[in-house]
Image (cartoon, rainbow, N blue to C red):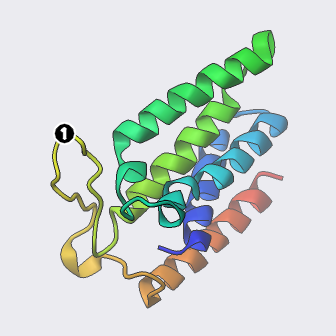
Amino acid sequence: MTGTTHGLIGVCGAFGLSRATRAPLEESAVMVGVALAASGLPDVDSKLPLAHRGPTHYLLTAALLTVLVAVGAWRFAGPEFDGSIVAGFACGYLLHILADMSTVTGVRALSPFTRRRLWLLPRRLRFRYDGVREHVLAGVLMLALVGGVVGSL
């Protein structure tokens, strides 16, 4: 998937989570912003000497990084810690992995425990990078996001 689609998925997921938890506006904004940033992080492997969709796409990596973000946010915020940074990070990072599990190549999300690739969709519904289905998904996500924002005003 493209970075744009990953970003839209992360933002929509975090926005939905913030509405579902009735988070105040400030916390919602933090959650959405952090999710947008985190939704691109798994693809840093393309800029490093790592296999694409390798360790940065493992669920174990997502869990460990989320714990590190939680500890850092808690230490930084102290008694003001509200969890919106952690929720946004987990949402953006995990939704990136789930989105890639909807592609033709899938993801080895359970590595290092198994090398087996995982998919969320049946073969004929899987996305190709920058393909028509992905563009349709991006359009639907944009409409859902605009509708959600307008509906929450």
The residue drawn where x is 39% and y is 52% is: 57
Location of residue 111 with respect to 129 vertically, above or below: above
Quarter of image, res 138 = bottom right
Looking at numbered disc 1 in the image, what kind of residue is underneath it?
Phe
Out of 76 and 122, give the one closest to the viewer. 76
- Which residue in the structure is indicated by mark 1? 113
Out of 67 and 15, give the one closest to the viewer. 67
Q: Left of 128 or right of it: where is 77?
A: right
Farthest front residue? 49
Out of 65 and 93, give the one closest to the viewer. 65
Residue 38, given in percent of the width and then of the height, sits at 61, 49
Q: Secondary structure at mark 1?
A: loop
The residue drawn where x is 67% and y is 53% is: 37
Residue 102 visible, this orientation = yes
Quarter of image, res 34 = top right
Residue 98, given in percent of the width and then of the height, sits at 39, 56
The residue drawn where x is 49% and y is 55% is: 42
Circle 1 packing at 10 Å, graded few (<14), some (14-19), many (20+), is few
